[in-house]
Each structure stands twice: as C-alpha cells, then as structure tokens.
Amino acid sequence: MERIRAPAVFSQRKRQKGRHSPNPACSYEIKFNKFVIFIMQRKMGMTRRTFLMELARRKGFRVESELSDSVTHIVAENNSYLEVLDWLRGQAVQDSSRFELLDISWFTACMEAGRPVDSEMKYRLMEQQDQSLTLNTSESEVPSFTASKVSQYSCQRKTTLNNFNKKFTDAFEIMAENYEFKENEIFCLEFLRAASVLKFLPFPVVRMKDIQGLPCMGHQVRDVIEEIIEEGESSRAKEVLNDERYKSFKQFTSVFGVGVKTSEKWYRMGLRTLEEVKAEKTLKLSKMQRAGFLYYEDLVSCVSKAEADAVGLIVKKTVHMFLPDALVTITGGFRRGKKIGHDIDFLITNPGPREDDGLLHKVVDLWKKQQFGRDLRRYATHEKKMMLDNHALYDKRKPFGTEASTVAHCLKHDACQRIPGCSVEGTASGEEPGYFNMFPKGL
C-alpha cells in the first residue's frame, strides 16, 4: 500500500513570520486511496483540526492539510451548506460540485467504523437544509431564543443552575462516561459538548426543530435526542447502564487515585466490585488509592451549602493565623447558588504585600497535625467497633471504658493497637504526639 508522510499544519501568521515547526517524523499507511479528506478549520480551531487529522491518518485515511484538486471529501463542523460554499468561493474555487460536502458526523462515523462509510443524505450538507429553517415556520412554533446566540465555546456560555433538558443531558453524560472508559476521546467530547449546550438553553427541547442551528449537535447526539423525544428514554444509555464493564469501571473510578488504566487492569483480573478489590491480597495500592479507600465515604458524599459555609469558616480561621488580612472566598458552584456540590472551591488573596509564599503548605501542615484525632477515632470506630472521646475508649459490648486520655494509652490497649508498619510522629519522652500517622511507612 502507498505511504504518505503526515504534513505539518502551520498557520498563515506563522508562515509570514518565518517560524516553522519541524515536520513530524512519523508516516502512516494509506488504506483508502479513493478518499482524500480535507477538514475545514473554520469554527473548529487549529488544535482540534490537527488532532482529527492525526487520528484519521493513524486509521489509514488520506488527509490533506491544504485544499487541492486531489481532495474528494470536505468535512465541516458547525457550518451550513451556504457557509461552506462562501468559504470555497473565498478560496477561488469555482466548481464545488466535485467535492462531497459533509458534516463532521460523517467523519466520526468513519472513525468509529475504522473505514469509510457511505456518505448518506443524513451526512451531506445541502441547500434545502438552510432553506427549511425559514420556510413554513410560524413564530409560535419557534422558541423565543436565537440559536446563533449560543457560542460553540463553553467558556463563552453562562453556566445556569436550572437545567431544562436534564433527561437529555443525563443520557449524554452516561454515553460520554462510557466512551471515556473505552478511551474514545472523540465521542466522549462529542456528548460532553452537547450536554453543555443543552444545559445552557433557557427552554426544554420538545422537538427536533428546537436544536436546529445549535453547535455541537452531531449525528450520534441527534439520534439520542430524537429517540428520547419519541420514546421518553434512550435505549443506548439504558444499555450502557446495564453493561457489566461500565458498572465495574464506574465503581473503580469512584475511588480517589483510580483511573481508567487501573480500572482496566482490575477488570482483566476478574474483579468487578470494590469489595472484591479490597479482598484481593495480591494488589499493591498506591498512596492515593489507599487514602481513597480509607476516606471513600467522605469523598463520594455530597457537600451541602451549610457544610461549605462551615468549612469556609475553618479555612478563614486557619489562613488568618498566617495572613490576618487575607481574603478567603468560596467560588465555584456554591458561589453560583448551588445547594449541593461534590467539593468546595476557595480563592485566597492577600491585598497587602506579597507574604503568601508557602501559605498553602503552612495551612495543610497545621491541619495534618490536627488530623491524628480524627484518624484515631475512625480506626477505633470502623476497625475496632469502639467509641473514642477525649478521655476513654468505650466498647458497647462491655460495661466499662478504657482510659484514653493520651494517644499512648490508646495504643497500649488491645482495643486500638498500633498498626504494623505505622508510627506516632512527633513523640518525645513525656510529650504528647503531634500527629498520628495512620498510613504504613513507605506510602
């Protein structure tokens, strides 16, 4: 088969300045010589275009960096038929009929299949699609919202608290997560972007006309929307939720420090649940994973606005110990008015002279020293089934308590023995330890 060296993509501005990047050293085997693809950068951006070109070349497609006579298929994203024609006229192309003008959904379908798919009518950009937006449509049939106001860039869209299209966005997020577990970045981003757009809409989508002109509405996304409109649910999302692999990966990645690669490893070992992972003695967990299992319930629990405010007071109090004039502000979802969140974001600024070097390290170190009591209580409660207060250990099965006025008292009792490989740091003769290290040495 013919081989082609992947050409570098340079912006016109860089060419004018004489700044050139080196050509990529890799070459790819061309499997489909009859198809020569050109991807329009308009409304897409150079970074995404470069990524898609590289992906197609790896799969055996011939992709041209510049529009030339050899091109057979032109792929556009978020561009109408008339917009593509206007762009071609700007490139001094007189006869556009020699090109197949296709939506990005055709490209993604080819990438999923690993080969060229038929350029069916649903993939083609045609003039009638643009005319149909204005014909036979009364004002009462169209939401009082202009699709052109919706930016294709999420950073230019306001994040709203009221999601009028939750049934769609929930399905999209399930599909995106499943593709993330399969390490399919293109389809994952396609559904995430579509979910972000629908969350921005100030009205519920009730028919396919409601999404006309919106960005990020690819072929797969439209299929899911149409099915939900007609059937009330997505069979594809429902199928994913019942998939054993998805359910296992969902559990595994809920643990702090566990990603897709580790989940894949555990799944191939035959593990399916977190209980099976914890029971597997041959596994060597990283420091983050050990912490993830130890604090699992805390990390997966939602945070209320009241809890966020309470934590905010603790953060302010600690920060002011080192920088009395510092401003501590809760940002993120709680600042936007959310009542429930998964974490709390803080912005710490110092209006005076720059004296905040090492501030976070100082704050965290102080909290570490205060953490030993919480870790000790957690170990006593969960591992030894006992209650610990400032003075004693209590076993509900026995009518008496055990003196526990110091950490040393706790450790010498059978109720809460020192964990093998663990240490009590900061302890000198006759002194109270400053930090009880619950993790084995070497983590």
Image (cartoon, helix red, strand yellow):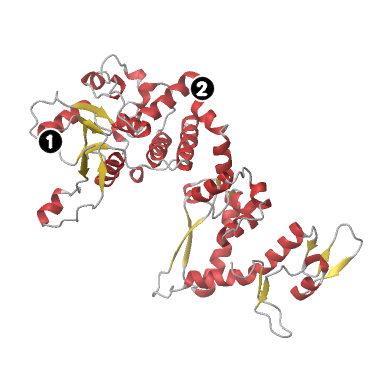
Residue 68's disc number: 1
Q: Is residue 249 visible?
A: yes
Please state if 420 lies on the left or on the right of 259 as rendered. right
Residue occupying image coordinates x 59% and y 46%: 269
The quadrant where residue 339 appears: top right
> Nearest the camera: 106 or 172?
106
Q: Is residue 130 above or below residue 92?
A: above
The x, y position of residue 220, in whole percent, is 39, 29
Residue 232: assigned label: 2
Residue 415 image offset from top left, x and y in percent: 81, 65
Local crowd size for mark 2, using a 10 Å CA cut-off: few (<14), some (14–19), many (≥20): few
Seen in the picture, residue 18 relative to 176 is either above or below; the reply is below
Residue 359: give x, y in percent of width and height. Answer: 48, 72
The amino acid type of the residue labelled 1 equals Ser
Judged left or right of residue 248, residue 223 is left
Q: Residue at x 51, y 24 (%)?
A: 233
Q: Work out which quarter of the rendered image holds the C terminus and state it.
A: bottom right
**Label 1 residue SS:** loop
Q: Which mark is residue 205?
A: none
